[in-house]
Amino acid sequence: MQSALHGMIEKAHRYAQEPDRLRFESLTTRVRGDNSEHTVRLAQGRLSCDCNHWVHEGLCAHVLTVERVFRQHLPAHAVPYPGAEPVS
Ligand SMILES: [Zn+2]
């Protein structure tokens, strides 16, 4: 029992050294902006936000912040940059 636990901890330590092993499938994050807090969500491979910028422009600082911090754990094309080719 003790050696099994030791093995798990050792493996977790090794996995944690290789962050590309982790990819978020869903995520809900509160982003504290200068003026107010907003919720950024990852669903179906895309990030989205509840702020007005997102609603009207399809992009905002909150989504870009989450992308910047968690980039290596997010699916490719999680942020639909304006002018980017639609992902099929
Ligand atoms: Zn936003």
Image: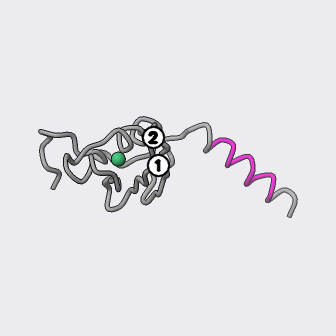
Span colored in magenta: 5-14
Q: Is the CB–ligand 1 distance for label 2 below 8 Å?
A: yes
Of the residues shown, which amino acid type is indicated by label 1?
A: Glu
Residue 48 percent across, percent down from the top left: 32, 54
Q: In which quarter of the image is residue 44?
A: bottom left
Q: Main secondary structure of the magenta part?
A: helix
Of the residues shown, which amino acid type is indicated by label 2?
A: Gly
Q: Which residue reaches farthest front? A: 35
Asked if the stretch drawn in magenta spans residue 10, the answer is: yes
Residue 6 percent across, percent down from the top left: 81, 52
Q: Mark 2 points at which residue?
A: 33
* CA neighbours of label 1 inside 10 A, class few (<14), some (14 to 19), many (20+): few
Which of the two residues, 65 or 86, is positioned nearer the viewer here? 65
Tell me the quarter of the image containing the N terminus. Answer: bottom right
Asked if the stretch drawn in magenta spans residue 56, the answer is: no
Residue 88 percent across, percent down from the top left: 15, 56
Seen at 16% across and 40% down, the residue is 82
Seen at 69% across and 43% down, the residue is 13
Number of numbered discs visible in the structure rendering: 2
Q: In this view, does 40 lie to the left or right of 87?
A: right
Q: Which residue reaches farthest bottom? A: 1
Instruction: Assess whether mark 2 and mark 1 are in contact (beta carbons under 8 angstroms).
Output: yes
* CA neighbours of label 2 inside 10 A, class few (<14), some (14 to 19), many (20+): few
Q: Mark 1 points at which residue?
A: 37
Which of the two residues, 60 or 19, is positioned nearer the viewer here? 60
